[in-house]
Image: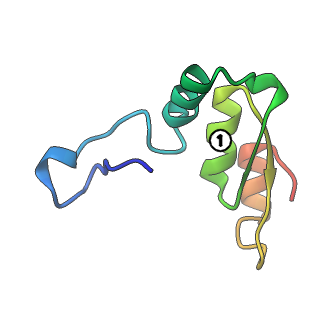
């Protein structure tokens, strides 16, 4: 997980970073550390930010949600994915 948050209460972790979704930093770090072929990989998530991070990292993506919360028309249009 990313310990940083722009409005966090702990000063040393209060920052904007590239490892917090929708930025792909954590996925890029995993790719480099584990030698992952992102073009042959899929990220499964339940939020629009998960899909945006996957796209930015060059990975395929699938959205899941037990209550289909992430699957509303604005999300699909903004991110270009289906549920």
Q: Residue at x 42, y 33 (%)?
A: 18
Taking the view exactly as shown, the residue that stands out farthest to the bottom is 67
Q: Quadrant of residue 31?
A: top right
Mark 1, residues whose alpha carbon is within 10 Å: few (<14), some, or many (≥20)?
many
Q: Quadrant of residue 72?
A: bottom right
Q: Is residue 71 above or below residue 15?
A: below
Left/right placement of residue 70 relative to residue 13 reads right
Q: Position of residue 10 (x, y in %)?
A: 15, 56
How did the renderer colour the structure? rainbow
Q: Position of residue 45 (x, y in %)?
A: 70, 55
Left/right placement of residue 26 relative to residue 63 reads left
- In this rendered view, identify the residue nearer to me: 9 or 43: 43
Taking the view exactly as shown, the residue that stands out farthest to the left is 11
Q: Position of residue 50 (x, y in %)?
A: 64, 49
Q: Residue at x 21, y 48 (%)?
A: 14
Left/right placement of residue 78 relative to residue 20 reads right
Q: Position of residue 23 (x, y in %)?
A: 51, 36
Q: Residue at x 60, y 50 (%)?
A: 49
- Quadrant including the C terminus: bottom right
- In this rendered view, identify the residue nearer to me: 54 or 26: 26
According to the picture, the residue beneath numbered tag 1 turns out to be 52
Q: Is residue 27 above or below residue 20?
A: above
Q: Residue at x 32, y 39 (%)?
A: 16
Number of marks present in the image shown: 1
Taking the view exactly as shown, the residue that stands out farthest to the right is 82
Q: Secondary structure at mark 1?
A: helix
Left/right placement of residue 17 relative to residue 44 reads left
């Amino acid at each position: 997980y990313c310990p940083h948050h722009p409005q966090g209460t702990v000063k040393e972790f209060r920052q904007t970073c590239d490892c917090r979704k929708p930025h792909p930093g954590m996925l890029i770090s995993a790719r480099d550390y584990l030698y992952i072929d992102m073009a042959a990989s899929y990220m499964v998530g339940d939020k629009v930010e998960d899909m945006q991070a996957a796209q930015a990292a060059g990975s395929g993506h699938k959205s899941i949600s037990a209550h289909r919360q992430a699957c509303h028309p604005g999300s699909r249009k903004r991110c270009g994915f289906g549920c």
